[in-house]
């Protein structure tokens, strides 16, 4: 057996604890390594292991904040925010910094909102112990608390009172303030958050920045605008497989790497969502990916972690394979609102169906080239044992 190890302090300290081999297995005529206790899909280089840890750190550090509200510490996740999601005739739904702001910029604005007199009054108003409906009037950036028994009964029976997305109704039947209540205010009144592509871009920007490249400056010339305005141009079209800024990747699980971008489709075969891969656990059979969306359970709306499970003995299969299980539920942003009838989980947005041709995995070319420069074996599946 011939092994060429990529040695680093990370590997030295963590070698015996890691579930996946950290050595780059060189092709050899000696196949004794296949007699390992299990088949290793491929080894992970030091860079991949470091990047998994780095993305986890960035996720936890930049996308969650704890606030003291009414004497309680409440962890708030970065809200979802997408321009024009709830447009009304005569009114455009516009989000702070277009949903593309840097995490620090967005949190600074959220700090102002939570410290405002209006938010304090909101918290006091929804803290009454009896059941109530909180009505959010998004065009006027305001709310009201309603105690109409007929309305409360309707909503308890899941009879939602409005078909206009700009007017949100939320049933609250207790007095405890939760992160859900904070999210509702930030989303509906403050109109602040990060959309899916803004989040994916910021994650890749962090990867590039870790290796000395500022993506805003990299793209400014081709976009013909100032570097600080570049994120405003980052949308699904920028990440489309046909875009000159990305390269499409075969979505066999063994090909995936941290930083790769998942692209999802909806009706009419249009791209509707994006997410970013954080890690692939070949022993446990799990892919962890991060995303920002409000099509999620109440506690997960905004930036959150999702998981895909696969058979560890079959890492060569596509993400579209029937044996690959996508656990993330796709639900309406507020209970009772209309839901997409053809969507139950992220699998329905990714696998080909009668509704669409299926999703894709892409890489920002700049980030791909940067990682290859730092580790020529980063994308090399010849590291795989038995593949």
Image (spheres, grey):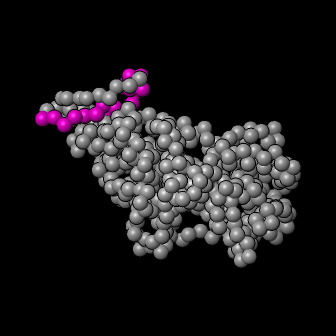
Q: Residue at x 23, y 44 (%)?
A: 387
Measured as percent of width and height from the top left, residue 353 is found at: 41, 70
| Image quarter (top left, top right, bottom left or bottom right) of the N terminus | top left
Percent across and percent down for residue 45 are 35, 34
As drawn, the residue found furthest toward the left would be 29
Could you tell me what secondary structure mostly forms the magenta stretch? loop
Q: Position of residue 250 (x, y in %)?
A: 33, 55
Compared with 250, 151 (above or below) is: below
Is residue 80 visible to the viewer in this orientation of the structure?
no
Magenta span has 15?
Answer: yes
Q: Nearer the viewer, residue 233 or 113?
A: 233
Judge from the rendering whether residue 295 lies leftward or rightward of residue 253; answer left or right. right
Residue at x-position 81% and y-position 45%: 115
Question: Which span is picked out in magenta?
Answer: 10-29
x, y percent for residue 5: 29, 28
Taking the image as shown, residue 361 lies to the left or right of residue 140, namely left
Numbered label tally: 0
Most foreground residue, 52 or 253: 52
Residue drawn at (25%, 29%) of the image: 4
Magenta span contains residue 312: no
């Amino acid at each position: 057996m011939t092994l060429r190890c990529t040695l680093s302090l990370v590997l030295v300290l963590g070698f015996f604890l890691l579930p996946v081999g950290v050595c780059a297995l060189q092709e050899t005529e000696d196949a004794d390594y296949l007699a390992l206790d299990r088949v290793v899909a491929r080894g992970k280089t030091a860079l991949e292991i470091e990047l998994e840890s780095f993305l986890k750190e960035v996720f936890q550090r930049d996308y969650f904040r704890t606030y003291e509200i009414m004497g309680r510490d409440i962890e708030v996740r970065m809200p979802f925010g997408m321009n024009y999601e709830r447009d009304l005739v005569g009114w455009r739904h516009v989000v702070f910094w277009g949903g593309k702001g840097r995490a620090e910029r967005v949190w600074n604005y959220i700090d102002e909102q939570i410290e405002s007199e209006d938010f304090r009054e909101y918290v006091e108003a929804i803290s009454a112990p009896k059941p109530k409906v909180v009505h959010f009037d998004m065009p006027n950036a305001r709310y009201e608390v309603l105690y109409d028994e007929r309305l409360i009964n309707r909503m308890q029976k899941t009879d939602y009172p409005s078909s206009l997305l700009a007017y949100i109704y939320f049933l609250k039947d207790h007095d405890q303030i939760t992160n859900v209540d904070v999210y509702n205010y930030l989303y509906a009144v403050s109109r602040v958050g990060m959309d899916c592509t803004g989040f994916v871009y910021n994650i890749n920007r962090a990867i590039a920045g870790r290796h000395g490249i500022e993506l805003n400056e990299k793209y400014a010339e081709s976009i013909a605008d100032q570097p600080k305005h570049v994120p405003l141009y980052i949308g699904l079209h920028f990440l489309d497989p046909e875009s000159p800024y990305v390269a499409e990747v075969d979505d066999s699980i063994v090909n995936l790497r941290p930083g790769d971008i998942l692209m999802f489709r909806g009706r009419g075969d249009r791209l509707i969502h994006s997410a970013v891969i954080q890690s692939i656990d070949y022993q446990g059979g799990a892919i962890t990916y991060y995303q920002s969306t409000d099509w999620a359970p109440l506690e997960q709306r905004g930036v959150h972690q999702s998981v895909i499970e696969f058979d560890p003995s079959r890492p060569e299969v596509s993400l579209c394979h029937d044996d690959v299980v996508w656990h993330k539920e796709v639900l309406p942003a507020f209970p009772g609102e209309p839901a997409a009838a053809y969507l139950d989980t992220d699998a329905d947005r990714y696998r080909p169906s009668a509704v669409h041709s299926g999703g894709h995995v892409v890489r920002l070319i700049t980030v791909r080239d940067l990682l290859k420069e730092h580790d020529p074996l980063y994308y090399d599946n010849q590291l795989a044992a038995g593949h």
